[in-house]
Amino acid sequence: MYVIMVYDVNVKRVVKVLKVGRKYLEHVQNSVLEGELSPAQYKKLKHEVEKTIDPEEDTVRFYLLRTTRYLTTEELGLPSRNEPDSSFL
Amino acid sequence: MYVIMVYDVNVKRVVKVLKVGRKYLEHVQNSVLEGELSPAQYKKLKHEVEKTIDPEEDTVRFYLLRTTRYLTTEELGLPSRNEPDSSFL
């Protein structure tokens, strides 16, 4: 499944959350990562993020797409950091 | 189509970009908006955002889903600002 992860976390934890996220996903924009994961990988990612954030202060949102067939991505302004797999663009 | 808008813009323009975004979409998390738009509404949103950002400094990314049938959203930590239409959760 294709996973888009967006996060709004306390500045004290941003580096750690990003570090965890980049183990699994592509960092495409400030506070946004995305990539193809197996259910098992996604479960591990979620577990690691859960251990990293403070649930009282931080928010992490995952968009899970069982297929990218109906997804198009468009951008305005500066191109993202590292273009994700362009096969779905 | 369902639109997810994520943005990374200079702090001088954040309020303006958010103001434009909220005319069309639900503000669910810091720098993240989402909602159902017609192609015409999306075109207008993109045009207004284009006029608001500095393409040399800012990045705005749109994920366009022609259907939400294959989309699931999950969250960790604090719930999002205003829960979007939960029909697709």
Image (spheres, coloured by chain):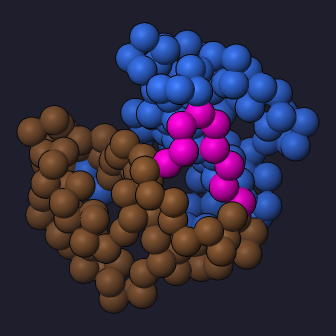
Chain colours: A blue, B brown
Report whether B2 appears left or right of A2: left
Q: Is residue B66 above or below residue B4?
A: below
In percent of width and height, residue A62 lies at 63, 46
Q: Nearer the viewer, residue B72 or A67?
A: B72
Residue B78, quarter of the rendered image: top right
Report whether A1 appears left or right of B19: right
Look at the image and tell me in which quarter the C terminus of chain B lies. bottom right
In percent of width and height, residue A81 lies at 43, 34
Residue A48, quarter of the rendered image: top right
Q: Is residue A62 above or below residue B72?
A: above
Would you say the magenta stretch is mainly helix, strand or loop?
A: strand
In percent of width and height, residue B71 lies at 70, 64
Q: Is residue A3 above or below residue B66?
A: above
Span of residues in magenta: B72-80
Report whether B5 appears left or right of B16: right
Q: Nearer the viewer, residue A47 or B86?
A: B86
The residue that appears at 37% across and 42% down in the rendered structure is B30
In percent of width and height, residue A17 lies at 56, 20
Numbered-mark total: 0
**Can the viewer see residue A10?**
yes
The residue that appears at 12% across and 64% down in the rendered structure is B51
Residue projecting furthest to the right: A40
**Can the viewer see residue B68?**
no
The verdict on residue B46 being magenta is no
The residue that appears at 82% across and 27% down in the rendered structure is A44
Report whether A11 appears left or right of B49: right
Q: Nearer the viewer, residue A36 or B31?
A: B31
The residue that appears at 71% across and 54% down in the rendered structure is A64
